[in-house]
Amino acid sequence: MKNYNIYKFFFAIVVFLGIISCEEREELVIDSTGSPIVMDLSKESVFLDGNFPNNPALTVNWEAASYSIPTEVNYIIEASSTENFTEPYVLGTFGQSVKYATFTAVQMNNAAAGIGLPANVAGKMYLKIKSYIGTTQQLQQESNVTSVMVTPYKLVYPDFFLVGEASYVGWTASAAQILHKSENESIIYTYLEKDKNFRFLGQQDWNPINYSIDDATTDAGNRYFKQVSSNITVADHENMKFGGESGIYKVVIDADKTVQSLKITASPILAFDIPQVYLVGNVAGVNWTVESAVAMTKTGAGVFEFTTTLPADAEFKFLGQQSWGALDWGNISSTGNTGFLGPKDDNGNIKFAGDGGSYKITVNIKAGIYTIVKQ
């Protein structure tokens, strides 16, 4: 009985000390006592050279923020085109031991594009530093605002290659479909299959660059698209899923640093396995007489070919009927010879400088491309 009472006594002491300890922890409060201060920029003006993207361009030094008790402090460096930072661009994040950061030409150029500074023109970039503690960025403090004049170079936007079970090429990376690039936009009209996965590559290989949705559930190195249309969802840590009905869709990527969007909309011509396709233009003796448009030879679902001579001023289009009807394909967006197909209301004539020799013309409606190959 005495031993039992002794055990009860010690147990009570332990509980009492635990309660006191918990109360003391609850009273522990961290206060901010001093904000970070931007002490120095290595330059007052920076001329960025696209030929040397990895060269150091600007170093930012700062004095550490302080808090009422020792704690881990993190920093964010932001850039803006306005002094009030209405739309800041994050240059980088850094841990407690870091008190300076050096940015390369390409990092500064991306920041300049991100805040809307035009290429080849000197513009003012405002900089400031935020300090915070914890994973939820608590007790934020802001530094003074400073600025630097930056002359950015014209951005070279990335190439995007479509691959995946939802796509025309399947999961064959070496055959991934490149999109037609015009400045910051990459576009293609191509086949997509409902409820199947896909992604974009930066090359016709799995490495090194992959692009997916910028989401906490995807691999950090693949996060890119900040905005996607409603028919695109996260499939897994690497891929996206297409939710529309199977058919031909217009895929548009806006690679502007402030946008980085992916939009997929139905083509005016959703079908691809057309019974017959005709060639019309100043070729094969047709002379743009649509009723005489020449029938091409079908070699696969949505794939047709025709061999003919092409003059120096050759221009032509593809039709799904011997009339100016709904089934109409030409060079994507406007007259030219990009090799990419566009449907009615989003195309122009295919213009080709032939030499009077024989050429095989192939159109692949499913893939959204055409080729002209000398025989």
Image: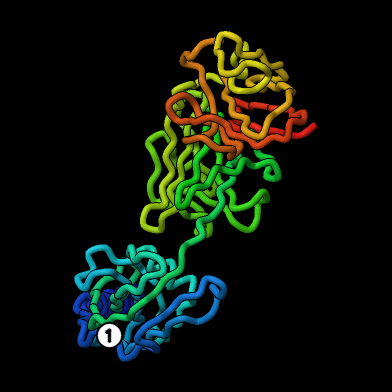
Q: Position of residue 302 (x, y in %)?
A: 63, 21
> In which quarter of the view is residue 8 placed?
bottom left
Residue drawn at x 20%, y 87% is 33
Q: Is residue 131 visible?
A: no
Q: Residue at x 57, y 31 (%)?
A: 350
Amino acid type of disc 1?
A: Pro
What residue would you read off at disc 1?
Answer: 36
Bin the neighbour count of mark 1 within 10 Å (Cα to Cα): few under 14, some 14-19, many 20 and up: many
Q: Could you say where residue 375 lies in the image, as x and y percent from the top left? A: 80, 31
Residue occupying image coordinates x 43% and y 73% = 108
Residue 109 versus residue 358: which sits nearer the camera? 358
Q: Position of residue 64 (x, y in %)?
A: 32, 88
Image colouring: rainbow
Q: Position of residue 303 (x, y in %)?
A: 66, 22
Give the tally of numbered discs.
1
Examine the rendered structure and indicate whether residue 88 appears above or below residue 240: below
Q: Quadrant of the N terminus?
A: bottom left
Q: Looking at the picture, does residue 119 appear above or below residue 373?
A: below
Task: Judge from the rendering whether residue 360 lies leftward or rightward of residue 228; answer left or right.
Answer: right
Residue 48's place in the image compared with 343, above or below, is below
| Front residue of 14 and 363 | 363
Residue at (47%, 35%) from the top-left corner? 333
